[in-house]
Image (cartoon, coloured by chain):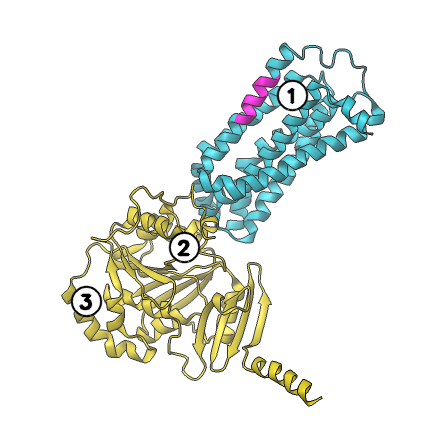
Amino acid sequence: MFKYFSLVLFILLPLTSFSKVIHSERSLYRNIIVDEHGNKRCLKFNTKSSKTNQSCLFKDDPQKLVFNYAKLVFSSLLMIDNPKRVLIIGLGGGTLSNTIHQLYPDTYIDNVEIDPAVINVAREYFGFFENEKIKTYTQDGRIFIKRAKLKKQSYDWIILDAFNGDYIPEHLLTKEFFEETQSILSTGGIISANTFSISQLYFHESATYYEVFGNFINVSNKRNSNRIILAGYAEQPTDEEITARVKKLSSFLAPFDIDIKEISKSMSSTKNNKNWPKDTKVLTDQYSPANLLNL
Amino acid sequence: MYKSVYCMMSKTNALIYFLAFSSGFSIMGIELLGGRILAPFFGSSVHIWGSIITVFMLSLSFGYLIGGKLSTKNASLTRYGLIFIFASITVLPIVFFAQEIMEFIFTHIEDSRYGSLVASMVLFFIPTIILGMISPYSVRLLVTDSEKSGQVAGVLYFVSTLGSALGTIITSFYMVLAFNVNDIILGFSSTLGLLGLITIALHKTVFKNHMKTSSPAI
């Protein structure tokens, strides 16, 4: 009798340390799950596996960035100074927008997110902050950028972080899209794109970025399978300029758990290091089988 | 039952069933690519598919009506082949003018839902009406006996819907991996045109007695 009781206890005990789902809803596009595991609250798409985490925060220290890729995005600050207008495609939990606002309270931030449910969840569970300078648009990122181009708007820092639970949407990976994005980038601005470093698309994406922007910088460390692509700059900053920015930003970024010095070491330019085959097919609006090549 | 089905399968019937299969294949292949064509201008929200499917359903319904009406006037393999040739021609603007058309609509219509609806109408309405004419016209060419008319229609819709299923899966699973969208659409257009020409040629030669000896069916 006691043997069975202890067996049941043995099985149930680990379950208490499993994460607890505090909110879930089905939007038009995906299942959204917010769960908590100890001190960490995470936004997940579609399934409860930790592999599908979109955004996390620490409940006791919400300004500290959790995700490696989110910290890597700030490598962009080694390429530009004092961004005044920021565009973020793909909201997630809103952590990038919140962090940028805390660093630069006077900066205008436009967040574009196709799924209204994601925006609601970000507001309710991840403390996503908005004011008259921080606006959110419920729209497809491609359409927003196309309209911004028509209105001749420009941004100093454009962050491409759209993800549909499967991969980046195909029409946001094409040469034409990158050309449209480039046309709303201000002089001296920077584009940071979050993508993956392990997928059959890796070569295609690199070739496509190179086709539009010329040389770009890959930022990645071995901690996970993301890479940030920094593109759209006319001239690569010199080592001295980067070191100066590292020095200036180190203490500024430290409260967010961003080690800018270490991040600067994870940057590598394609200038003398084009690691994709010369004849790699560029992704275009005519040919962009992203979801198939991602398998 | 097997024996009576076998008797129906003369060579002309086989041709007609194959043509119906091809039209089903082409309709779904083009519809699937519609999403890819519209996405750069109207996004990939769920409304896009609402627009595309609405337009295809609407145009197919008109196609069925018009095709049925057309089949009452001197139905022949030649006219059947001509439907395919017209379908082939009206598909071509999707390849050559889609960018300009969508650019114009995007600039003038702010709401991407209605923009995508208008774009779908302009690009797909006419070709799909013509492709929709094929099914009822096929029934007219195949039915010789009103008692079997239901079964003939059943086999026809089986074949053409099977074509639709294969068109969907082959386009979305395999063709987009290997080809540009425009090349796939050109492929559909060429195939439809070629099939139309072959049908007319066969009617003028090998099948010239088709429909001459059969009694007025219904």
Work out how far the residue at label 2 is from the one at label 3, CA to CA, in angstroms: 30 Å
Q: Which residue is mark 1?
A: B80
Taking the spot 61% from the left edge, 15% from the top edge, the residue there is B200
| Dot 2 and dot 1 residues touching (CB under 8 Å) | no
Amino acid under disc 2: Ser
Q: Which mark is residue A199?
A: 2
Placement of A157 over or under A62, stated as above or below: above
Q: Numbered disc 1: what chain?
A: B
Q: Numbered disc 2: what chain?
A: A
Of pointers 2 and 3, the one earlier in the residue sequence: 2
Question: B199 or B166, which lies in front?
Answer: B166
Taking the spot 54% from the left edge, 26% from the top edge, the residue there is B191
Residues at discs 1 and 3 both on one chain: no
The chain letter corresponding to yellow is A
Q: Nearer the viewer, mark 2 or mark 1?
A: 2
Q: Residue furthest bottom?
A: A2
Question: Which type of secondary structure does the marked residue at label 2 adopt?
Answer: loop
